[in-house]
Amino acid sequence: MITPTHDEIAQQAHKLWQDRGCPDGFDTEIWLQAEHELMETAAAASEIAIEHRAAHAAAEHEAETVAIQKQEARAPQMPHHNAPRGKPAETGKPLWKQPHSS
């Protein structure tokens, strides 16, 4: 979480002090309230940034997946031979039992 700087807290405290009508004796209370408000704002901004990064990462992952799917879809299709193969002919033996006519 991002911690607000001293100057940021001072500016917020001054604004709160003016909004309350410039009261005396509430310096610490106003300072702590300003610090608390800035911490909440920083936490909310941090959560939004985390959600934004997560959404960006998810979109990037989806884009990579789509690119891979396109590449696979455009790849040349090779035929698949799943049928059982016949036995090869034995070498040295005639293929016909009867002699060929001449």
Image (cartoon, helix red, strand yellow):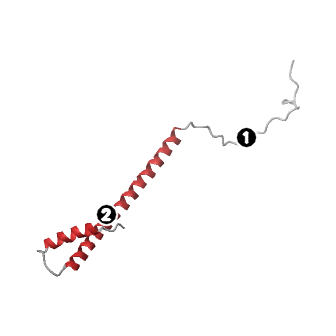
Q: Where residue 68 sits: x, y (%)?
A: 50, 45
Q: Where residue 95 sits: x, y (%)?
A: 84, 30
| Crowd tier of the residue under label 2, counting other residues whose Cα lies within 10 Å: few below 14, some 14–19, many 20 or above | some
Where is the C terminus found, in terms of image quarters? top right
Q: Compare marks 2 and 1 and give the one earlier in the sequence.
A: 2
Q: Amino acid at mark 2?
A: Ala
Residue identifier under label 1: 85
Quarter assignment of residue 6 = bottom left
| Crowd tier of the residue under label 1, counting other residues whose Cα lies within 10 Å: few below 14, some 14–19, many 20 or above | few
Eye-nearest disc, 2 or 1? 2
Vertical arrangement, residue 92 with respect to residue 42, above or below: above
Please tell me which residue is depicted at 88% across the width and 25% down the height of the picture: 99
Residue identifier under label 2: 45
Helix, strand or loop under label 1: loop
Residue found at the very far left of the displayed protein: 21
Q: Amino acid at mark 1?
A: Arg
Q: Where residue 4 sits: x, y (%)?
A: 30, 67
Q: Does 95 sit left or right of 30 as displayed?
A: right
Please tell me which residue is depicted at 36% across the width and 58% down the height of the picture: 52
